[in-house]
Image (tube, helix red, strand yellow):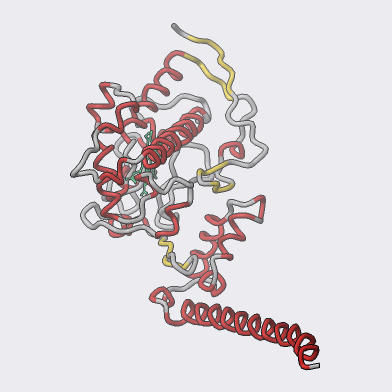
Amino acid sequence: MLAGCSSTTAPLLDKREDTLNRFVRSSLLLSYVVCVGIYRLYFSPNAKFPGPKLAALTGLYEAYFDLIPKGGGQFPFEIKRMHAKYGPIVRIDPEEMHIDDPEFYETLYPTSKPYDQLQRLENRFGIPGATFSTARHDVHKIRRAAISPFFAKAKVREQTGHATVFTRCWPPACPPEELTYKRMQHESESLIGAGLETTAWTLALGSASPSCTIPRSTPSCKTSCAPPSPSTSPSAWTTRLPQPERWLHDPRGPDGLHPLTHYLTVFGRGTRMCLGLNLAYAELYIGFATLIRRHRLRLVGTTVRDVAFYAENTILSPWTGTKGVPVLVESSGD
Ligand code: HEM
């Protein structure tokens, strides 16, 4: 009799315990979410900066603009709207601020003052072992030092291939964990990624210059960057066709003092500035010189829309229907 009784109440008790457990777990989770929300809105060191409350509360705000409107990649435009509404410094997500003032670049990216990047960004390209992805400054320094000699101007001139890039790193400067197969794999993937689309797109944009005649002595990598002004954000992007001629005759920036090149931030600044800059310049100079000197090119049906910044998908992309920058080769030299 007793045994029969316990066999019918036991599942009932188990079920009650289960419900209680679930209730406790959900309450704990809810309290955690509420506490994090209150912290982010009122107590975080970032709470004093203006911006949409929803963006301060959750990264889902950014995720929405990254993924949904116009097929995604719209967050830079939303940031621009935030600046128009809230001023030059805005909080764009719980952990990040965006500053719309070219003069602030030096303060933010000094060469003398190292800084860690956000840890969560290490995995954004799935290659956390690459120099580019490394969050901690001390590790980044070791990794950058190991590959940087191969990107020095003299080395680029010698045209040393990337094949030798990984022989420069040995203990004790490089601890053994820096020399694993996986680390090397991540570094090589990063170098291939960093060096391909960047220069390729710059060449394409340069070719979209209206007449395809780039004035003599125009620095070739400068055919495609944003017109600097106090109202543009430090991210260098433009919605216009390239205007290579504005780099002629040593032009000055908005303050009338700094040379315009001071505002050229396409390669970043500071301790994490692009390492492939010299290689990129070499590729662009040789590429443009070959294109412009040997061939007469005419754009075929390319409009501003085909090259203007439409979405940010890691790189800046034009509208999805673009066919790139088709050109007709009218004549060619030797
Ligand atoms: C027009 C061409 C290029 C542009 C606009 C460009 C731009 C950039 C930018 C903005 C960064 C990030 C800087 C930062 O985090 O603050 C970067 C990093 C980097 N780039 Fe480039 N890049 C170009 C070409 C190249 C090439 C050809 C290579 C070599 C294969 C290269 C290798 C790297 C590396 C290794 C880093 C990581 C540096 C570090 O974290 O210390 N880039 N680049």
Judge from the rendering whether residue 75 lies leftward or rightward of residue 118; answer left or right. Answer: right
When the figure is inspected, residue 66 is found, relative to residue 22, above or below; the finding is above
At a point 44% along the width and 64% down the height, the residue shown is 96
At a point 65% along the width and 80% down the height, the residue shown is 22
Name the spot of residue 88 as percent of width and height, x first.
42, 65
Name the spot of residue 37 as percent of width and height, x first.
52, 78
When the figure is inspected, residue 6 is found, relative to residue 129, above or below; the finding is below
Name the spot of residue 12 as percent of width and height, x first.
76, 86
> Would residue 222 be seen by someone viewing this image from the given angle?
no
Picture quarter with the N terminus? bottom right
Judge from the rendering whether residue 8 lies leftward or rightward of residue 276; answer left or right. Answer: right
Name the spot of residue 268 as percent of width and height, x first.
35, 47
Picture quarter with the C terminus? top left
When the figure is inspected, residue 182 is found, relative to residue 200, above or below; the finding is below
* Residue farthest left in this picture: 172
* Figure quadrant of residue 178: top left
At a point 38% along the width and 38% down the height, the residue shown is 181
* Figure quadrant of residue 188: top left
